[in-house]
Image (spheres, rainbow, N blue to C red):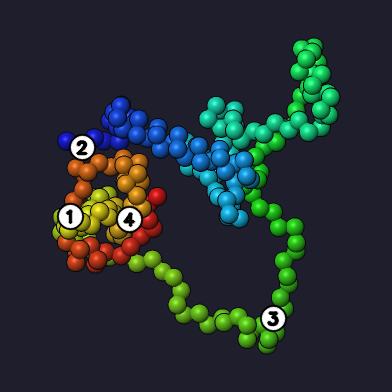
Amino acid sequence: MPYTRVELENVEFYQEFIQQLRTKYLAGMAALSENDFRKDNVLYSFEDIFTGLGIEDVDINNSLYTFLNELDWSKYTTAELLAAKNDPDIVLLPDVIDKRKKQLTVNNRLQKVYIKTNNLESIIDRNITELAEDLYTDELPEGMANGDVVKNAIAEDTRKWRIEGNQKRIFLSLSAFFGNGHIRNDLKTFKMSILKKIPNGDPIE
């Protein structure tokens, strides 16, 4: 019998699995924080593991996030640092730099002001007809309901989806599947010809 989300809070192997995911995620965050959250000139964004919100609002006094505080001793000379090391009566206080601010980008330049002219009309096509829109099925196939997790009947196809709002949302990884409180026994199997009739929703990470 599958576990409910409340029951999973007391399932030891599941909690160990979740803790491993959190530890790996925080390790990646800590490593990138040493380089202003950038890798190969790409800015990486992270979320608070407790709230799902951005890390700009995390409690940096929490032991899990202490790496977000950087101690800056640069205002002291080498001689001052060495003296404090050898004399316990000398107390030096470093500046504390909040690394979270390095996840934010600030534009210091004013945006260009465009005046509506014939030239501008030639550059911007205001007659856009192919606007993005979300598609939903009016009725789900027999045996399927919103909240179900489903898979293809072909065993070699390892993809999994959750049905929400009359759409199917694919799990981007096995970790995403288990991390959202699902287990294999929850899965319902349908032919791909049936699954294709259900519009795709946003993926689940």
Name the residue type under label 1: Ala
Q: Residue at 76%, 12% (x, y): give it.
A: 88
Q: Residues within 10 Å of mark 3 (few under 14, many from 20)?
A: few
Sequence-first disc among 3 and 4: 3
Quarter location, residue 183: top left
Asked if disc 3 and disc 1 are in contact, CB closer than 8 Å, the reply is no
Asked if disc 3 and disc 2 are in contact, CB closer than 8 Å, the reply is no
Q: Residues within 10 Å of mark 1 (few under 14, many from 20)?
A: few
Q: Measure the C-alpha gap from mark 3 to mark 1.
A: 58 Å
Instruction: Count how many numbered circles sit on residues in the image.
Output: 4
- Secondary structure of the residue carrying numbered label 1: loop
Q: Which mark is residue 2?
A: 2
Q: Measure the C-alpha gap from mark 2 to mark 4.
A: 21 Å
Q: Residues within 10 Å of mark 4 (few under 14, many from 20)?
A: many
**Which residue is identified by label 1?**
155
- Secondary structure of the residue carrying numbered label 2: loop
Q: Which mark is residue 34?
A: none
Q: Residue at 66%, 43% (x, y): give it.
A: 101
Q: Which mark is residue 116?
A: 3
Q: Measure the C-alpha gap from mark 3 to mark 4.
A: 43 Å
Name the residue type under label 2: Pro
